[in-house]
Structure formats: C-alpha cells, structure tokens
Image (cartoon, rainbow, N blue to C red):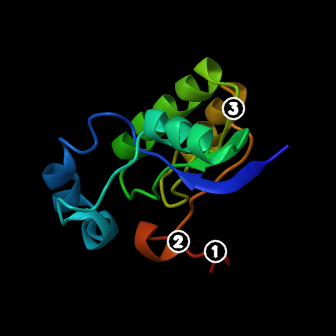
Amino acid sequence: MLIDAHTHAFAPGTDSERVAICARDETFAELYADPKARLATTADLVSALDLAGIERAVVAGFAFRHERDLAAQNDHLLVSARECERLVPLATLNLSHPGWRAAAEKALAAGARGFGELRPHNQGWDPLGS
C-alpha cells in the first residue's frame, strides 16, 4: 500500500477568505498572500492521490495562530476523513491557547490520528515549555 505521509489541505472557502486570514495570521500571509499560491482542498488531494496511484494520505492543515481558524480547519479535515477513508487526519493545535488540551481531546474523539502541523515560532508558544 502506498501512503503519502505528509500532505496538506484547506477547507473549501479558505481561498475566498484569503485576504481576511492574511490580515490576522502573519505566517499564512507570508506563504499565501499571493493569489497565485494554490490552496489545495481535500477534494484536490483525493484527485491527486488518484492520479498518482497512492492509496492513502496523512493530511494536516495549516498551523494557524487563531482558534477559530484552527477549529474550522480541524472540523473540515475530520469530516473529510469520515467521508473518505483514504484520508488519515491530523488535528492542528496552538498550545498557547488556554483550551488547547480540550481541543486535542475533542479532535481525537472525532477521529484525529495525531497532531500536526505545529509551528511554535508563529503560534506564540515554546516547545520546551520555558
């Protein structure tokens, strides 16, 4: 079985919200402010898997800074994985948020298989806890 162990996907609508997301998330803006930067959806990912003959993909979202962006993304990836067993979802957390542990437990209960993409440097937390 061929598995792509590192893929990314965005919820539909992220592209239409690009300007607003860029305004509130500096790292997202660094990577995706240019409208030519493609934001692949989970449907795009499944199509790419079909073309490449890959059976499954571990899929992560983006390490957003804000809780609402993370929640929307995680919800979408988890629903997509329930609808398509070829997708193995990772939930994204921001450990600087007071509710990160509850968000992690919620994601695991909903089918997340782990966590990633984590970016402490832009999310405002220290991986060493200091």
Q: Are marks 2 and 3 in contact (CB under 8 Å)?
A: no
Q: Is residue 99 left or right of residue 70?
A: right
* Type of amino acid under label 1: Pro
CA–CA distance in space, label 2 to label 1:
6 Å
Q: Residue 113, position in %: x, y?
A: 74, 40
Q: Name the residue under label 1.
A: 127
Q: Mark 3 points at which residue?
A: 86
Q: Residue 16, position in %: x, y?
A: 18, 41
User: Is any atom of residue 71 visible in this view?
Assistant: no
Q: Name the residue under label 2.
A: 120
CA–CA distance in space, label 2 to label 3:
29 Å
Q: Which sits in the foreground, 70 or 76? A: 76
Q: Are marks 3 and 1 in contact (CB under 8 Å)?
A: no
Instruction: Name which of mark 2 and mark 1 comes first in the sequence.
Output: 2
Q: Residues within 10 Å of mark 3 (few under 14, many from 20)?
A: some
- Label 1 element class: loop
Q: Residue 93, position in %: x, y?
A: 55, 51
When the figure is inspected, residue 127 is found, relative to residue 72, above or below; the finding is: below
